[in-house]
Each structure stands twice: as C-alpha cells, then as structure tokens.
Image (cartoon, coloured by chain):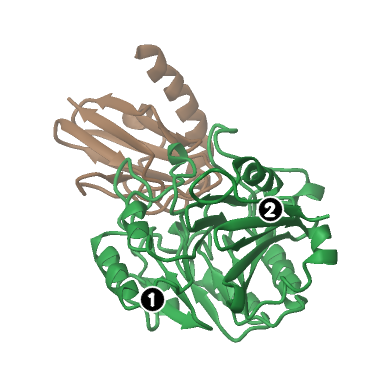
Chain colours: A green, B brown
Amino acid sequence: MRKFIGPGSSDDGIDRRGFLKCMAWAGTGVFCIIHGGVLKSYSLSQMAHHGVDAAKGDLSFVQISDSHIGFSKPANTDVTATLQEAVAKINVLPTPLAFALHTGDLTHLSKPEEFDTLDQVLKSLKTSKVFYVPGEHDVLNDNGKQYLERYGKGTQGEGWFSFDQKGVHFIGLVNVLNLKAGGLGTLGQAQLEWLESDVKRLKSSTPIVVFAHIPLWAVYPEWGWGTDDSEQALSYLKRFGSVTVLNGHIHQTMQKVEGNVTFHTAMSTAFPQPQPGTAPSPGPLKVPAEKLRSLLGVTHVNFLGGKHTLAIVDSALQS
Amino acid sequence: MRSIFSSVAVTAALVLAFGLSAATQGKQGAGPSGDQNDKYQVKIDNFSFTPGSLTVPAGTKVTWTNHDDVPHNVVSTDKKFASPVLDTDEQFSYEFKDPGTYAYYCSIHPKMTGKVIVQ
C-alpha cells in the first residue's frame, strides 16, 4: 500500500493532512516524491515493493553533511568511523552516482589535519566528483581562506558556484561568513547579485537544486536555524516550476513544501542535535550508544528527467 | 546583581582551577591565579554568555571560558577585540582600559550576544 497525498484545497496542490503525515515520518526512513507540485510519500519498506522504478532516476546523487571531523566529545567519540560507515552505505547504493554534495561542517575546528582526514575518507566514495559548501566550522579563524584554497577552485566570491547536470541546474551557496551580531546565516549582497544573474538565462521549466549549509528557511530562528536574507534569494527562484533546497546544520531531517519549493535538511554523520526548542541549546545530543547510528545518515536524491520528479530518501546508518 | 556576581565568581574559581591547565590557546593576557581581577568571568554555556551584561571598573581584565561541547568565540561588535576560537574549556581574556559599553557576540553563532560595561 502506498500512501498518496492528493491535491487538496490549498493553492500549492498539497493536502495539508497528507503532508503532515509525510512530515511525521521524516527521520524514520521516509521517501517523498515531488511531482508537479503533488507530493507522494512512501516508507522505505513500501519502496521495496512499489518504488523500485522511482529509485532509478536519470540523475542520482547523495548529500553528506556535518561530518565534524575532529569532534571527540561523548555524543560521538569517533566521527571518522561514522563517516566511513556513511561512505560504505553510499557505495552499495544500486544506482551509480553522478556526484556527491557535502553541505558543510566538514570539520569541527577547521584544522588542516581534520580537512586531511575528511579528504582521505571521501576518497573511497564511489563517485569521481564531490561538491562542497562550507559550514561555520570550516571557516574558523581565517574567514574561510583555507577552505577556499582546498575546495574553492572554480567558485565565485567566498565559494559559491553553479553547474548543470542532465538538465538540472545546481547552485551551491555560502551562508556562514560575515555573520552579524544577533543575526542568522547570511548570503550577502554580492552573492545575491550573482544568484540573480546566474538564473536569469534559465528557462522557468529548468529544475533547480540549491544547497547551502544553514537552512534557507526559518526552521528555528531562536537557535540561529535560518538565513537572514534567504527570502530575497528565493524570490529569484519563484518563477521556476521545481526548486529543491538541500541544507544541513541542524543534524536532523526536516522537510517543508512551500509552493514549488521543497526544503529538506539532512542528518549529520557525526552527532544528532535536539529537535527545535526541546533542549536548553542546540548543542550535541548525547543518546544511548545503540541509538546513535539511527540518528546519523545521508540523503540520496534521484531525479527523473522525463517526469520532472525528484525523489529524496534519507537513510540512517542503522535503522 | 550582587548575588549573581558572587555565584559567578564561585563558579569561576572552580573553572579557573581546571581551566588553567586545560586551556591551550585563547589565553591572551590570562594572568596567574590569585590575580585580583579573576572574579570578572563570563561563562559560555548552552550557547549563551553568563552574565549577559557585566559591569566592571576601568582597567579590569575579563575572562571568558567555554563550557560547551562546541567551539565559540568572543568578538567585539565594533571590532575592538576578538578571541581566537575557543574549544571546550579554553579561555580568553581582555583588559578593558577605557570606560564605555562594549558589545560582543560569538561570530560562529551570532545569536549569542553579550556586553561589558566599563565604568
């Protein structure tokens, strides 16, 4: 039995009740397909029966996030091992990967040896290309200089860039630099201008995938989980029929659909963080050892060009 | 206010005993224990500065100590001072010579703000 979330009375064509059901599954292995503004969701076990075709897209890639190499506190004393497990999980996916995205916080303290370890582990990924955007932990002390030297080749400004693959336009944004006192993540004027001109030449039917470290929607501003000028960025993307926004930073999966835009956050490979407002602070969440790997994982995205459908699957290291 | 300061000072004394050996960087200007200014401490805990507002006489050295499992820093809003990144248990000190209000924040987690009022 697959769950179908049919068109409701709202303008975006998504039935609220059905969507909330999909939300409730997030984090427990939910599989959502967005097709022409209609969202269908399957559990991973249902997918085994019904979703085989859906899992084989024209374009397949994974999102890795928040590996925090160098972190060694009780919440996870071996973050290199859990990243290696994530890579092993990716390497047995049935579909060949076009590339991998790392949505930031590669390291915990921006130390050269932490970046070296990350590079070493990701070398064994079965894909030739990894695209990066920085997290705030990757630009400590030097405003991102070292990050840019290592990962910024061919990027603009402080590390933003775009590329096209199989008809999909991908945009990597940087929202962790020049943060203002009391504020949230920031894209900044120069990057916004670049974004506006970057998408100008594209047809509105071009599927867009935007990725950045800090969520580009107000997940929980009280904990800094949002980006001050994300609305302006999204205004440049309004005319596009399919926009998918992939973020990290909050170390848990969360999804929201607003018009033609689907927002999604990935799990960390290092340690979980509390759900918004459920703890005194967003600091690392210490869970029983046997539960840790069910809260860490990666995101797998498949794009079916013919149907203009993007399928997002979150898989934990251990169910 | 007085009771807040004294509880901070007690905590700070405990912190200092442990922190001095653990801190490896960010100790700019940190003096020997027993320094009369050691009571001017700001605790970084649960993504916040405590006390959020600290009033001190001119010439006071203030010390921040990070108790969180994640790194933070202490950056003056108008760029008068900036700590290196402080990992768990690391400290940073700064001497406030001139009267005024010094707003600061954590530039990694900018929701974290505080101020030092120098009289």
Density class for disc 1 (Cα within 10 Å; few <14, some 14-19, many ≥20) is: few
Residue visible at 74% across and 57% down?
A42
The residue where tag 1 is placed is: A203
In front: A151, or A60? A60
The answer to whether residue A301 is above or below residue A238 is below
Task: Kindly identify the amino acid type of the residue bearing the numbered disc 1.
Answer: Lys
Viewer can see residue A132: yes
Picture quarter containing residue A138? bottom left
Q: Which numbered marker is on residue A266?
A: none
Find residue A73 and report its horizontal and vertical position in percent: 63, 50
Mark 2 touches mark 1? (CB < 8 Å): no
Residue at 33% x, 70% y is A158
Q: Mark 2 belongs to which subunit?
A: A
Disc 2: which residue: A76
> Does A79 sit left or right of A281 as displayed?
right
Circle 2: residue type: Asn
